[in-house]
Structures are given as C-alpha cells and as structure tokens.
Image (cartoon, helix red, strand yellow):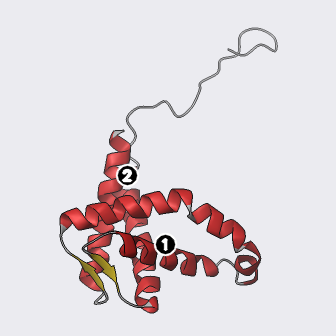
Amino acid sequence: MMKLLIKWLILTLSVLLAAYLLEGIKVGGFFSALLAAAMLGFLNVFFRPVLILLTLPVNILTFGLFTFLINALILKMASGVIPGFDVQGFWTAVFGALLISAANWLMNAFFGNQKQGSGDFIELKKRGGDRWE
C-alpha cells in the first residue's frame, strides 16, 4: 500500500514538473495534480492496454512510436475529466506525455525501488546426492 502511495506522489510531482516546464499544461494546484495523477494511473491501467492492442499494427509499423500518441491521448483524456488540469493542444500533449513519462521513470528509479529486505532470491544448499533444499 505504501509503495502505491509513493508511486502516486511521484506521478503527481511529474505532472507538476510538466506544468512548470510546458506552457500549454495548466494545473490549478497540488490537489488538481494529485487528481490528475490518479486519473492518469487509472487510464493507464484500464484503457492503455486496450488502445495498444487495437493499434498494434500501426504501432509495429512505426516501431513503437505510435505509443507516444496513445500517451498523449490519455493525457488529453485526463485533462478533460479533472477540473483544474488543462492540456492545450496536440503537441503539448505529446511533449507533456513524454516529459511526464521520463520524469516519472527517473523519480521511480531514484525513489520508487527501495528494497525493504533481501527476499529477492532463494538460497539452495545441496543435501546429499542430487537433492537440493
């Protein structure tokens, strides 16, 4: 649960960064960015796989570059639903989606993958013959 909240906060900060750097993205405040991040997460979980699957031939022909347009569409969809979050224009949506994805990836690389313990592997010991425990 804590990991989900951290990822949500990281995505919120990514949205705020995009709004700060791009003139066509407007965020009314932190709460609007928080709601926008929640909506982006929801749309990425439920609609993005369907859109990727439906546009798979085009995506293959463009070597995956069509995914940027799908991300821009999802960003525009979120701006249409969340009050206080506005994305103006197609190219702003494309660059905003790219910036949000890159910032989210970077912040998750630094803050999101903190390991709590060493439960990532299983240590096996040979116990007589061909038996491992």
What amino acid type is highlighted by mark number 1? Ile
Numbered disc 2: secondary structure: helix
Q: Is residue 103 left or right of residue 42?
A: left
What amino acid type is highlighted by mark number 2? Gly
Q: Nearer the viewer, mark 2 or mark 1?
A: 1
Q: Tell me where residue 36 appears, x and y as whole percent.
A: 33, 66
Q: Is residue 3 left or right of residue 52?
A: left
Question: CA–CA distance between discs 2 and 1?
Answer: 23 Å
Task: Let me know if residue 111 appears in the view.
Answer: no
28 versus 45 height, above or below: below
Give the residue displayed 27% in from the left and 71% down from the top.
83
Q: Tell me where residue 124 appears, x and y as whole percent.
A: 64, 21
Task: Let me know if residue 6 appears in the view.
Answer: yes
Q: Tell me where residue 1 appears, x and y as whole percent.
A: 36, 38
Q: Residues within 10 Å of mark 2 (few under 14, many from 20)?
A: some
**Which residue bears the numbered disc 2?**
112
42 versus 33 height, above or below: above
Which image quadrant is residue 27 in? bottom left
Numbered disc 1: secondary structure: helix
Closer to the chain start, of discs 2 and 1, is 1
Residue 74's mark?
A: 1
Q: Tell me where residue 67 appears, x and y as whole percent.
A: 60, 76
Give the residue displayed 77% in from the left and 77% down from the top.
57
Give the residue displayed 63% in from the left and 81% down from the top.
66
